[in-house]
Image (cartoon, helix red, strand yellow):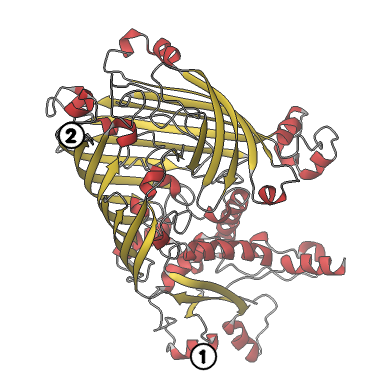
Amino acid sequence: ELQQRKAEYVSTYDLPLDYPAKVVAAGANREDDAQSKGGNGESPRLRTSPDFINARLLEAGVPLGRLPSSASTDASTSSSSPSSSLAEHGMSVERFIKDLEGTGCYDSVQVHIGPSTKSNADAENGEDQTSMQQYDATVHLREKKWYKLYIGGGVNSEDLSSLGSATGGGSAFGGGGAAGAALSVLPKLQFETSASLLNLTGFADVSSASYSVDQTGSTSFRFVHDRPLCSYFAKGSGLYSYLMPEDPRNLNAQSGEDDNSSDAAALEEDEIYAMDDAQYALGGGSHATLGVHATFHDVDHEHTRSSNEFVRSLGVRLANHARGAARGTFSMSNARGANKPSISPPESMAGPYLFLDWSASLRDVLPKRSGASPFALDCSPEIARRAGTYLKHSMTAGLYLNGCFVDDRYDPTMGYDAHLVGEVAGPPGDVGFFKVKGGCAWHLPISLLGAMMLGVRDNEYSGEYVNSNEDVDSPTVIGTSLHSSFNCGILHPLTFNGLLQCDSSSIVPVSERFFIGGPGQLRGFLPAGIGPRASGGGSSVPGGDALGGDLFYTASVATSVPFPTYFSTLRQNGARIFGFANAGTCVSMSNGLIHGGIFNQILQSSRVAIGGGVSVPSPMGRFETTYAIPIRYGPRDARRAVQFGFGFSFG
């Protein structure tokens, strides 16, 4: 009991931190290093800008520059501000460390808190320290080398991200979308080599070029340069000052307390769900990034529409941050290095992700050749007619919450998630269309639902209430959650007053249409397993080549429970058993669907499946195994009862 009281007292101890924080190389003595700097506060051994580090500290919620609380003889009135306590410092510092290590530019990041050197100097001069005690925050950085070379192998992430996409793949809509990807086709092994330049500007910028070739001979070249937007502007300029947090010393005592308290309260509220992603505000701040990306790669569609694409693209992306959710999703080259956010799917990023992307791509659509005769095609006539080269010029904007309002991003039991993306393609390209897709998901524990039905308000709900209720305390109910999700999208061709061809099939290529099916999207059906299809197809495509649709929706309801205690390893790793029912459709509007009763057509074409499965969260994403029984389907739909899937959200 004494130790518990001591821990509670220490956790609430008031520790006001001085501004700015000191930034030194790891292993350096703070006092000796400060003397070697000549008073300018910048270590010659570090490339990182101290202003950048202080900005990240403030945005992570570390209350630098807060005035110390006044001394009081009354114990009841001497409680410190929550945002200045040691416990709050620990949470905000942990957020800061994870954020900085996530850039891939540092081997280690440590934050030391100790008595302020200024306060010590004042104490030696005999000044009263009763209401002036301050503490210093010193950040110890161990930077990686400014270059990185890698030669090795891994798994082709395109195989895992493109199959479950609602779009055809290779667009700024991302790879697997929020839905996930099906592992019905084994991912390909690949050889990869890459070269990276890290933190050259002192703002954790990353430049990387990689080349890979997989076991089928398909090659890929990717280049990305991601750099915080503030690093493009001179220090002291208007835009630089706008992006960087305000100096706490410029705030008066009263307004400073108000601002810090409100910021701390906002972060404290987000702490329940956002965890280490709370600092990624939609406004960007010092996290706002302007990146350039270029790719040359093959996209394999042989298992869905008997064709391949060779894509050459160049683009620029402005985003509110550039940190990936996991350091190295599938490729071994990324396992200990920086992410490539400008070419990563938006749903793989950490925290809320708001972006604007301009891209221009030249695409070659290559129909699949017959293995028996090199002069014959192994595809449908519809796919053969769409073969050729086209230029796509587009602007894309989107917002992904990326699980910042759920308790577990990859296997949630409480909270909500959402995403919305819009894309416009037009001149000077060869294709023109407007495309929007979005979705949302809700997760609600049975115990919380019971408390709400009994009239318990949200702010009164706690574990103590649950344990006091015999009905809710049963093993069957504890840990059980309800889940629901809904996703939809629409595509409309644009001719831009005759600047583009009037044939809708050429204005909107097959790859830009929607494709539905697979785990996390529409279980019980293969990727691109429903929707418009050609009368025939290649030998590797069941039911005929998928031609894609202009309108889709998917909806699902599910309930999940933790694994029984007998399976302790699976239960401790967050594995859950779930049952589900999902429905969806994908239709084409080129045949006058809008004028023929769109809602009736959607209902008549909807597919439905029910089943169950097992999900396991991991640092890379969410793996699931499902068994589904389609109860409403078309004669040419591509169905699959047992499926393995990977994704970044529940569905």
Q: Marks 1 and 2, Cα distance to the nearest angstrom?
A: 76 Å
Residue 171, disc: none
The front one of 527 and 40 is 527
Q: Where is residue 590 in the image (x, y as percent from the top left)?
A: 26, 18
Q: Is residue 634 visible?
A: yes
Disc on res. 373: 2
Residue at 15 percent of width and 35 percent of height: 388
- Across and down, in percent, residue 131 comes to 67, 75
Q: Residue furthest front?
A: 372
Disc 1 designates what residue?
32
Is the residue marked by circle 2 packed among few (<14), some (14-19), or many (20+) residues within 10 Å? few
**605 lies above or below 206:** above
Q: Is 508 situated above or below 648? A: above
- Which of the two labelled residues, at mark 1 and mark 2, occupies the earlier sequence position? 1
Q: Residue at x 32, y 13 (%)?
A: 593
Q: Tag 1: residue type?
A: Asp
**Disc 2 residue type?**
Ser
Name the foreground residue: 342 vs 497: 342
Which residue is pictured at 31% across the width and 63% down the height?
193
Question: Which sits in the foreground, 548 or 31?
Answer: 548
* 102 relative position to 452: left or right: left
Quarter of image, res 416: top right
Q: Which of 262 and 447 is in front in this view?
A: 447
* 301 is higher (above) or lower (below) than 572: above
Quarter of the figure that contains the N terminus: bottom right
For mark 1, does the 10 Å Cα neighbourhood hold few (<14), some (14 to 19), or many (20 or more) residues?
A: few
Give the residue at the far top of this rendering. Answer: 596
User: Which secondary structure, mark 2?
Assistant: loop
Q: Is mark 1 on a helix, strand or loop?
A: helix
Position in image of residue 485 (x %, y %): 53, 30
Note whether residue 239 is visible: no
Q: Where is residue 602 in the image (x, y as percent from the top left)?
A: 42, 15
